[in-house]
Amino acid sequence: MSFGQGGSQWSPGGSHNPWDNQWNSTSNQTPDWASLAEQSEIRNRRRRLLMIVGGALATVGIGVAVAVAVVNADSGDTTANGPNDLPATTDIPSASAKTDPSFAPTSAPPPLNPKDFISSSGKDKAPISPDILFPGSQLTKFGNVYLKGPTASTTDCASAVQGTLDKLLTSNDCTRFMRVTYHRDKFAVTIGVALFDTEAKAVKVKTDWDKKSTIVSLSGDDVPTFCRTTVCRTTANSYGRYAYFTLTGFTNGKDMTEKDKAAFAAGDDLSKSTFEQIHRRGQAQAAAAANEQ
């Protein structure tokens, strides 16, 4: 029986399944749910495997890249000890770097030698006289006080000596002879200083001295005549262009002997003082020349 067209149609014998055409247009069978689930699981396992393999390959790639970078860094600098992005060594302060201030090298001249200024008349230009070389009214040496007596100076060197010293001074062109006498107790010492143009001539006079000739004692100013007829002690030495002598004896007419230790000491004291005074003369001229540089 028909109720008109356009309505629902029912097949005899049972109801119509609307999913038939969606799952299988050629068959009226039910879908294989187990097979579909297995295929889906297979696809999921493949996807996970690909992700694991891809991650592993990525990790290996990074490791290789890092290894290559390290090798390249080492091959470029065998002393490399750290990453390549550190600043250059000139930018890193060294632990052993000195922090002391640096100064430009100086070229100060060496100190002048005082002896150079008293070894030739060409340099020894400072004024000189017995009172300049032996200033003051007394001299103290090793605690002993010696009073200063008369002084004398002459260009006739032979007139101030006796024995063979006159010829020795003249042959070496002595230019000046100065004397000064010091006294203490009952003995006195006359110091004689001869000047030459060169050190070599002063040395020759000292070397050729016969040890018997001597200077003439200088008396006056409370110092009686001494060492004219009595035994006295004479010494000779030289320093620079100066030859210097001492004559020591008693002022009471007594002969001097080796037992007279105080008189011997007086002669030694004044000989040493003469050397020091000549050296100071060189020091003063050296200092003046240094200040002019």
Image (spheres, rainbow, N blue to C red):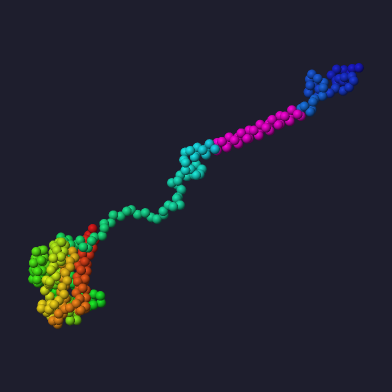
- The image quadrant that residue 278 belongs to is bottom left
Left or right of 70 on screen, residue 58? right
Residue in the picture at 24% in, 60% down: 112
Residue in the picture at 67% in, 32% down: 49
Count of marks placed on residues: 0
In the displayed orientation, state which residue is furthest to the front: 258
> Horizontal and vertical percent for residue 55?
63, 35
- The image quadrant that residue 232 belongs to is bottom left
Q: Which portion, as a residue range, is magenta?
A: 37-66
Can the viewer see residue 125 in this picture? no
> Horizontal and vertical percent for residue 139?
21, 75
* 98 to 121, vertically: above or below: above
Which image quadrant: the C terminus? bottom left
In the displayed orientation, state which residue is furthest to the bottom: 252
Is-magenta flag for residue 191? no
> Horizontal and vertical percent for residue 63?
57, 37
Residue in the picture at 21% in, 78% down: 261
Is-magenta flag for residue 44? yes
* 19 to 138, vertically: above or below: above
- The image quadrant that residue 273 belongs to is bottom left
Which image quadrant: the N terminus? top right
Predominant SS along the magenta part: helix
Q: Nearer the viewer, residue 286 or 179?
A: 179
Left or right of 87 on screen, residue 116? left
> Horizontal and vertical percent for residue 36?
76, 27
* 236 to 20, vertically: above or below: below
